[in-house]
Image: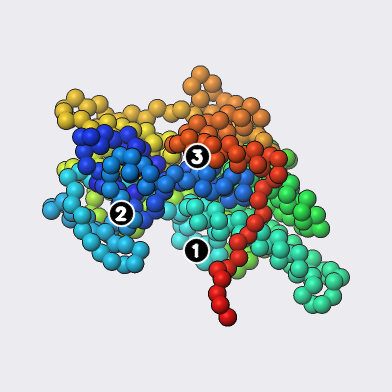
Amino acid sequence: MILGTGWASFRVLADIDTKKTDVTVVSPRNHLLFTPMLASSALGTVNQRSICQPVRPLVAKKNATYYESAVVAIDKENKKVTCRTVAGQDFMLPYDKLVVGVGFQPNDFNIPGVKEHALFMKETADATRFKDHVLERLEEASYTHALDNDLRVSDEERARIQDLLTFVVVGGGPTGVELAGELTDFLYSEGSKLYGHLKHYIRVHMFTYDLLNSFDQELQDYALTHLQRKQGVQVHLGAFVQKVEPGVVHVKTGESLMSIRFGTLVWCAGIKPHPFIKSFGFTMNDRGSQILVDPYLKVKGEEDIYAIGDCSTIEDYWLPQTAQVANQQGQYLAKVLGQKDQVNIKPFEFHNKGTMAYLGGFTAVMAKLPGVSRVSGFVAFLGWRFTYWFLQLSMRNRYMLSTDWLRTLIFGRDLTRFGPRSKPT
């Protein structure tokens, strides 16, 4: 039984030999989301369906079984899990071997106001909401001056428009940087062209302690310079958000405090475990944030239970919580579960195939590639796109991604914002 449809779980399903095993998948999400391209889908550069791999076709191909439900309890003694449907109905399923790959959720660090007033960038629905929100702010800024039935723009109205068109990105990791790059690409291309009367009001801020800390200092400096000079992002390093109120974010940088009014704030500042992970009764790491597993990805102190991906950590072998790590863990575990002889199994070993991030303006950075320490600029952008195209799990997604890029290049990003559902009056 596989819990979850993230990178690690999906890879186990894709690679496991179902001629030797009966496989059941339980997850409330019926697709794999290609999270490295979530920022691109958030502004319409690519369609969200192009970076989602439905689980049903693979389940049918592998002759497996899928339940669109969430696991709420695990009976380790009787080897059964309790599942709960979207409608709140519970049922139990048996297992022989259990693979837990339920991922993580955004981390608000218990900062006041973040849950209530920030947008997030973790799931497919987050990208949809973000795009609709950005377009809504642009339209609101277009009619704000007319609300008093006077088409002249007063100083007060100018200030209101400025607030609406101030965009704040919190977090300087790959997700935050790529979102800032995609956002400024959109705002200073389609945004400036189609909302020319608003382009002078647009501001983009990034608040973060550091920038792309998994890259070396040279590439960090390159990324910072590009974001500031080419993309027009006001990057605030060494910054800690103290509180978020409706339309206002309070930030501490060093000894100084500052407050900025905003129309949109998106939170990309880390991840944390789902609360139900602790309720499973597994051995956790010292921080109590991840399931502790041995070098063979088996949960410490448990029989026939494995944990992979972001929700787990290997004892004395720390690894970053990335799609690349989860993917390799899934490949490894699929081979382990398919072997009858469990004696001569080698422990899991991660092989870093490089890290990359898009900066906007057809520019990217790549590091720690096999044989190459660093690449930047347009060449890195081409490498970034090819790598993500190649990593898609089906030719369907590769085709859709290619046509999306071509469509955006020729016609620009799609600005459609779907309205409410029809309802008879």
| Kind of element beneath mark 3 | helix
Residue behind mark 1: 115
Q: Position of residue 202 (x, y in %)?
A: 74, 55
Look at label 1 and name its amino acid: Lys
Q: Residue at x 52, y 62 (%)?
A: 114
> Marks 2 and 1, how far apart in space?
30 Å
Relative to 208, is 74 on the left or the right?
Answer: left
Determine whether label 2 and label 1 are within 8 Å by CB.
no
Quadrant in the picture for the C terminus: bottom right
In this rendering, the answer to whether 158 lies above or below 366 is: below
Which badge, 3 or 2, comes first in the chain's sequence?
A: 2
- Give me the disc on residue 67: 2
Look at label 2 and name its amino acid: Tyr
Which badge, 1 or 3, comes first in the chain's sequence?
A: 1
> Marks 1 and 3, how far apart in space?
33 Å
Look at label 3 and name its amino acid: Asn
- Give me the disc on residue 396: none
Residue behind mark 3: 397
